Image (cartoon, rainbow, N blue to C red):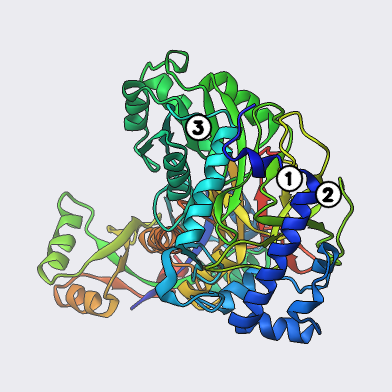
Amino acid sequence: MKVEQISIFIENKSGRLAEVTRILGESGVNIRALSLADTSDFGILRLIVNDREKAQLVLKEKGFTVSKTEVVAVEVPDHPGGLSRILQTLDRDGINVEYMYAFVERCGENAVIIFRFDETDRAITTLVGDGFIVLEGERLYAM
Amino acid sequence: MSYYNEEFETLPRPALEALQLKRLQATVARVYASVPFYRQAFEKAGITPDSIKSLDDLQRLPFTLKQDMRDSYPYGLFAVPMEDIVRIHASSGTTGKPTVVGYTKKDITVWAELMARCFVAAGVHKGDIIHNAYGYGLFTGGLGAHYGAEALGASVIPMSGGNTKKQIMIMKDFGSTVLTCTPSYSLFMAEEAKEESVDFRELKLHVGIFGAEPWSEAMRAEIEEKLNLCAIDIYGLSEIMGPGVAIECREAKKGLHIWEDHFIAEIINPETGQVLPEGERGELVITTITKEGIPLIRYRTRDITSITYEPCVCGRSHARISRMTGRSDDMLIIRGVNVFPSQIESILMQIEGVEPHYLLIVDRKDNLDTLEVQVEVDERLFSDEIKVLQALAHRIEKEIKDMLGVTCKVRLVEPQTIARSEGKAKRVIDNRKLA
């Protein structure tokens, strides 16, 4: 029920993001979702891609620092209050969201949100228990 | 001409050298008898106190390195029982352990006299108000200048460093006539004064005595213009005594007179250890010949200079060393604090248990030294969370501040951004224009 995200360290200077996307593009890796968190000095690019192994390999070859992180993809009903319900559920059980970002594609009628939790397994149990749909990684990579 | 101790400051060279020999012989005999480190070193070199027949015999004695002081931490090189030590100072060391020095009552008196001589050479008199902005504490700067000022009979304001606005207010309100601090801090004060709308031309300062870090003639011109005073270069190091080992005279401002009745200076080739002739540039080596607490034989200062014995217009017979132009090791002086790249390296190693690639970038912005530590983020350090990486950077900054007393900015950079030459990374880029 977990999704593998790759995270890449990039310095906050021009051309670095372009370099990462160029390397992935030339290797035929497709980016499914992304989020960029940045400070004045550096940023962390987080990606869901169709081919994690390959993405990690080609980026490392080019000298980037890359790591894999387990995240959770949750379907969010596409109507007002949809996301709020999920967050209330998590809050009730005292689960922290480290960060989150939206998936580009929709899953049928629903939007997909990627969550990074401090306690991934407990978060999944809570969400599933409350009837939310947590997507399998394989389904997501191929979306 | 005015002197603090005319007899000794103008002692004709033959008499000065005879005095040096007598004092050197006494020092060698004393350390041989009371410091096991020196007894062993002398025995290894086949030397006994009787071996010193002339000043040239000094060259037969082994060198003392900063490492020897570290190995003897804290009191191993002291030549007197602790009950005779009245003061302890220390300077930062590469392992986080400082280099410790001890002074007897007589050492403090001699230091005060030599510092008073420096004040007079710089044109300071009884009646002057000395604004002493060197740091007070383990660092020798503050107390060294303070005791010299009192020995001279001048009024001393024990400001210590920091709180620049207050410094400027006091300089103005108290009518300070002499400023003692690091050269970079004086320029920082000038900027701060501008913001406070205080004009240095309206202050009573007529001379500034600047040291504890290397500076240039260009910086002197800038200081003299901005602070409207005569800027004098002073030299010293805690291992030998502290401030007051050598000073420029106001008359010539060309080379620093080193007090040869208390120290013997040699210039050596740092590679071979051979003594170089007058005028040639090399590493300054100092032997203390009156110190009781911690006499040092041929201490390698790592400072690069040259020496001249030419008579000076000021009438002092003591040799002059030129402005320091660099170091024969990789020590950096950042805001007056000694920093070795290896210290930063060991701090980084302690933090993650591994040695990351790093680069130190030293610069001078708004007349203050800045240190940026670039650390390559490899997989061991990386996290997908911003807060973890920021905490890492702050932790390194704090450790460096705590261990070395120097404020720095840690910048996390991508791997392979730091240039490597022959497999070994270049560790320091010093962008300060000092020479």
The residue pinned by badge 3 equals: B186
Q: Residues within 10 Å of mark 3 (few under 14, many from 20)?
A: many
On-image quarter of the C terminus of chain B: top right
Circle 1 residue: B325
What residue lies at 42% left-to-right and 36% top-to-bottom? B153
The chain letter under disc 1 is B
Q: Position of residue B78 (x, y in %)?
A: 53, 74
Q: Residue furthest right?
A: B277
Q: Please check whether the numbered discs 3 and 2 fall on a single chain.
A: yes
Q: Which mark is residue B102?
A: none
Residue at position x 23%, y 74% in the image: A123
- The chain identifier of the residue carrying mark 2 reads B
Q: Chain of mark 3?
A: B
Residue position for label 2 = B281
User: Which quadrant: the N terminus of chain B?
Assistant: top right
Of helix, strand and loop, which one carries label 3?
helix
